[in-house]
Structure formats: C-alpha cells, structure tokens
Amino acid sequence: HLTVTEPVAVLKAAEVWGALRGLETFSQLVYEDYYGSFLVNESEINDFPRFAHRGILLDTSRHYLPLKSILTNLDAMAFNKFNVLHWHIVDDQSFPYQSIYFPELSDKGAYSYNHIYTPTDVRLVIEYARLRGIRVIPEFDTPGHTESWGKGQKDLLTPCYSGKQPTGSFGPVNPILNTTYDFMTKFFKEISSVFPDAYIHLGGDEVNFDCWKSNPEVKEFMKKQGFGFDYAKLESYYIQKILDIVSSYNKGYMVWQEVFDNKAQLKPDTVVEVWMGNNYALELSSVTGAGFTAILAAPWYLDYISYGQDWKKYYSVEPLNFPGSEKQKKLLIGGEACLWGEYVDATNLTPRLWPRASAVGERLWSSRNVTNLQDVCKRLTNHRCRMLR
Amino acid sequence: QLLVFVATPGCGGFPSLDSKESYKLSVSEGSLLLSADAIWGALRGLETFSQLVGRDENGTYYINKTEIVDFPRFAHRGLLLDTSRHYLPLRAILETLDVMAYNKFNVFHWHIVDDPSFPYESLTFPELSKQGAFNAMTHVYTASDVQTVITYARLRGIRVIAEFDTPGHTLSWGPGAPDLLTPCYLGKDPSGTYGPINPILNSTYQFVTSLFQEVSTVFPDSFLHLGGDEVDFTCWKSNPKIRAFMKEMGFGEDYKKLESFYIRRLLDIVSSLGKGYIVWQEVFDNGVKLRPDTIIHVWKENSMPYMEEMANVTKAGYQALLSAPWYLNHISYGQDWMAAYQVEPLKFEGTPEQKDRVIGGEACMWGEYVDVTNLTPRLWPRAGAVAERLWSNATVRDMQDAYVRLADFRCKLLGRGVQAQPLYVGYCENEFGG
C-alpha cells in the first residue's frame, strides 16, 4: 500500500516482500522535470499480484552464463516484479554445477574449468535473488537431458546397444540399477541443502525411449516388472523413486508436464509445468482437474524469436482461458517466461529477454482486465527507456 | 616480422569499386611476406594474417607454414545500417566498421535518413535536422561525425555510400523543409498529413539540387544511393494540384509516370554533380529511363523470385546488387545464417555478360527493431555468412566446414571484444562478460 502525499510518502506492506515490490513501484513513479528536479505525483496505490509464481527460466547448460549476466538479469527481474528464477542449470550439453559430493560431474561435464558455478557462485546468486524477493528454483532434469552427467558419473546413463553390442553412446539415466538411486539419493541430499527454496524442479521431459529399448538388461527388467512394451511405465517407475527421494528431504517438486501425462504417482503438492504448445489450455484443464497445481510456460517461450512486435502476443495470453471450475482455476498459480539457451548467451541474453519478458511480467502481476494495447505500448516503451537507465 | 610489399604505392586515396583487393601471403620458416597490387589488398591480407596467428598453451604466438593467393569474387560487398528508425551512436557505427573489416566487407551503405527521423546535420539546410531529428542536440550526426565515419572507413578499405532516399520515405524532411512534401487532401481540404516529395514544384528541384550538391561534396565516394523505393501514390492522388499536373503532362492515371518524372530529374541532377547512382529496384521495375551505368539494388522477396529480377535487371544491361535474401533484420528461430550462406548470387538464366553485371550484394540491418542495445549480436556472426558468400569462390559451400570456421571466427570476435552472438550450443574459452 503506497500513499504519496506531502510531506511524507508512506509505503506499508504485510511482509518485506511487499515492501520490495512497493519500492520498485515508487521508483518508477519518480520522474525528472525539465530543470532536473525529481518529482512524484500525489498518489494512492493498493497493489498485489494476481499470480504468486512469476518466473523466468534461464538455461546455463546450452551456453554457460557468466555470473554477472545472471545477476544483471536478477536486477531486471526485480524491476519487472518477477519473483522466481527457474535455474535450468545442467542438461545434455554441459554440467556447470560444481557438486560437493560429486566433483567429477563438473570436472568432466562442464565445457571447461572456466565454465563452472562454484558453491560460492551459487550462494551469491541465491542471496542476490533473495535480497530482491526472488526465489531460486534449481532444475536438475532427469532421466532425459543428462548426457553431460555421464561424463563424470560412470554407469549412471544407459548404454545403448546395436543388436548385441554396446554402441558406445549413452541414453537417459539407467533406471534399473540400484547404483542410480544411491547416486540420486546422495546428489539430491546436496541439492536440498544447497538450495533453500521449498521446491526443486526435477524435469522429466522429453525422455527418448530408443536407448532403453535397445538395451538387453533394460528389456529384461521390463519383462520382470510386467511393464510389457510400455516404456512410459519404466519412466514413471524411475520418476516415482526420484520423487520419493526428494520428498524424503522435505522438498516439494516441480515437474514438466510429461511426468503428469505419463501417469506417475505425484504427491498432491506437486507443481506441473505446462510447456507443450499445442492445446496447452486442455492440458491446464487436465492437470488442475486432477487436483494438481500448475504453472504455464507454453505460450511464453521467449527463445522463439521472430520478426516484429511479438511482445503483443505474449501480453495477450490469458492464463485462465481454459475449461474448468473456479476451484481448478485457483490451482493455476502462475507462469514462466523461458529463455532456452541453444542460441542465447551473455552476448544477446539481455536484449532478447527484455523488454519482451516485461509483457509476461505484467500479465502475471496485473489484473485480468488490464489489456488495453495502446496504453501498454506507451507504458512498455517508457519502461524500456527506464530499464536502459 | 611480416614484410608487406605493395606494388602501387599510395595510401591517400579512397577505395572504389575498381580497387584491387587481391593479395598473396607466403609464410615459411624465417620468412613472412604479404604482397599486394594496391594498399587495399594489403589490408585484406593483414586481416587474413591476423586470423592465422594462434597462441599455444604456453602463450607463444605461432603461425603455420602457408601459401595463400586470395582475391574477392565480388567487388561490392556491403552492409546497410539504418540510422533513421533508430539513432546509432557514433561508436556503434565505428565498431561496426571494425567488424566489417574483420569480415572483408568493403562498402558501408549508410541509410542515414528516412520517415521517422533526420539525423544528418546539413550545412545548407540546418532546419532539416533541427526539426527532423529525434533530438537535435543528442541524436544527430554533425559534419565532423560524418567525416569521422568516412575517414575511419577509408583506413579499413571501406567505401561509404550514403543513401538519401526519395521521393518516398521522407516524412522527417517535412518539418525542416516546408513545401517539400506533398500535402494530402481529404476531399477539397488538406488533411494535415503529408506524403512523398512534391514532384510538381520547381522549389522541390531547387532544394534537391542544393542538398545533393552538399551531399556530393561531403561524401567522397563516386556513388550515391538515391533510394526510390516504396512510393505510396495515395497522397499524390488526393492532391488536386497534382491531379491537374498529371492531366497537363498527359500521364493519365498512371502515377508511375509521375514517379519516373521526379526520378529522371533527380538522376540528371546527381549525374551533373559527377556522381554515379544506385537505386532500389522499383525505379527499374517502373520503367524509368536510366543511364546505362546505373546500379539496381534488388531487395524484394515477395513479388517475384529475386533471381528472376536479377536476370531481368542484368538482361536490360544494368549492373545489379543483391540484398533480397540478406535482410538480417528478419530474425527467426534457429541457424538462419545457413540460408544466407547458401544463396548463390549468380543462380539465374543468363549470359556470361549478364552474370558479370552482378557486382555484389549487401546484408541489410534495417532499424525498426534495432538500436545500439542489440545491433552487434544481431549483426554478427550472421553477416559473416554473407561476407564469405561475396568474397569466396562459388565452390566454397560445405556447410559443416563453414559452421566450424564461423563458430571459431565468432570466438575470435569475442576475443577482440565484439559482442557477437552464438551460432548454436557450445562455448568459447573466454565468454563475453566472463
């Protein structure tokens, strides 16, 4: 709650997080006149976010992002009242996270020794974010998207076969070995203590079954478990065990939608992230219909650049436009603008994210009826000039 | 020590379309020799030499034994920057010139003014930028700025070809030059809005003569780009005086004839000032009578396959520049450098004489969505694909090899402090801002 009158302006908030948001708003109300004096108009503002989860996804595996660029981005997020950094920290291409229990993961899996986030770096990001009211939710995506993990952790990934012979290449995490789960237990113990947020993102997207199908031991296991030829069952078997491991550390988890789609047994407080573009509204219905919390990313893949003012299409998304009851709609707790890193690194991250992500930021904070495009255009242009300053 | 030998002495002149850019580089034990016919070739060779030098783990510089004989395939290898849709600070232009030199680009096509703003400070008509710039104090190029650009470019063997686009794309000229633009009408009354340059007034041609007199002196290159694209006839059609003129001249309802009438006079004015000219393809498409040494700039991708246009232009005896497939402002998801690289400028039906008339091409970075905050990553290394296509032999088209070299070159650019964006997943030893 912000009241600007003479002689004193007053900012009141229930918690410090509200004060942070109010300070940002106040900073935007101050303007400079022709003579260089700073002014603020008399105003009375009562503000609160529409959605509680307003996130940005950064991918530091396809390209390493130097610390400075992550911190600059956290600043920009705060200017736009984003409150979650979804740190997609590792993936197929590189493993920059320096693990305390498993130093070989980054030793062998990072692009180079210069492309690493030390425990100090990680702590810095978390604290820098915290001071801006931003949660850091790390994503350690498994069982797919794990090629880089195999370099520093032998026998973690499934060896692929051609006929009776291993080909030398590897697939997703090997779900049939006890060593896999021993590793994951220890690994997630570390992650749970390093990252203070109540949630960890466990990924679970785009698992390619070809390698599993080619491996005779995996095929044997499928038979023994009675999974038939339904490898989605094997995927769920794996995911289940990971979810249980992570729960045992008292963390909640976020997963990509496939984990829900493939019918794993999820705890009721699981957050499902809907990212697949076709018919995401129907997916939101399914997810919330099954009683799970959801966040929306599908229409906000900002890495999909195109010519022109694409911010307008991001702005015009109405997250609650899906068939469902009032109760269901309450389960959509927010969304994320994703900037996947295939074509992005510190040389182009900032101009590619901002101010396009600002459109998403407003959609997630402001009321449903704030939609006047002419007005937005003016405000966003000003906001962009402000961010330049 | 690298010994540089230049056959034709003299570094004082300006580069031109005829400049000799060939060079020979001989590297062997105890001997590093760069020889070229002209200084411009020496510049190209020095750039190549700088790219051949490596550094090992101990920090020692080394270079492999090599023999290189190199020369460009096309003589006109340009980059267009648009400083009207967004003002580009001087340092952005100078940095771009540096990176152009790294890529052996040799023409800076400066699309300096357009509808949104007029940043060019004219000596003869100071009101143009006073009234037409975004901000006459901060968003202008002074005479000194312009000379800085021209000199900086020359030292890198880069020609500066200025474009003052008329009769369309001139809204920003209006405030500083009353009566220059055509007043549009709503019925019998002026609507208050303006259209292209008014082609029926003598004052127009007096103005154009004086302005181009200045421009011809300020910009030393033998060529000026006169624009002539996208002329919207609606305003002309609405103006009763213009309609009367059309009747008088016997043009009927064909406003292309009026456009040609203006262009013809403009071309005559510019020729009398001793400059050659480049025009966008519409001027050719609309049947304007052009001098045989006119260069036609092919840019349209939609109306007809651009290769057909290239064939038509060269068949009619004119020289051609290709830009249509190289609009780098048209961004999209993925490795779009590949499409740019795979363009074959001479892939059209024509005689060898026709093909000879294709003097090169230009990568264009129009400014609607571009300013200094995103110019460099959006330009590089994507423009590098165009640069190689214009310099190297037609047979150099292996995509895998090109990827490896371009990705490596990108890391080199980072090392030189250029904010070039990545081609695809991967890393450089030293990241930007790392």
Image (cartoon, coloured by chain):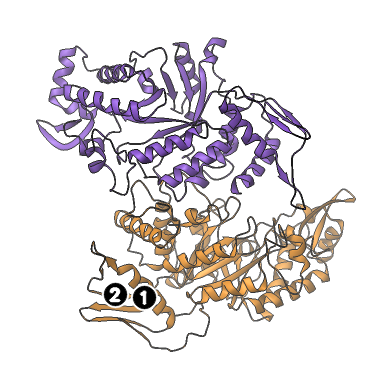
Chain colours: A purple, B orange
Q: Is residue A264 left or right of residue B217?
A: left
Amino acid type at circle 2 is Ile
Residue plotted at (47% across, 67% down): B98
The residue that mark 2 highlights is B68
Mark 1 burial class by Cα count in 10 Å: few <14, some 14-19, many 20+: many
- Percent x, y of residue B312: 53, 63
Instruction: Specify whether A375 is left or right of A186.
Output: right
Query: Quarter holding the N terminus of chain B?
Result: bottom left
User: Element at badge 1?
Assistant: helix
> Where is mark 1, residue-wise?
B45
Point out the frontmost of discs 2 and 1.
1
| Marks 2 and 1 share the same chain | yes
Expressed as whole percent of the image width and height from the top left, the position of residue B106 reads 48, 71
Q: Residue at x 48, y 29 (%)?
A: A297
Q: Chain under label 1? A: B
Q: Check disc 1 and give the amino acid type.
A: Gly
In the rendered view, does B276 fall on the left or right side of A282? right
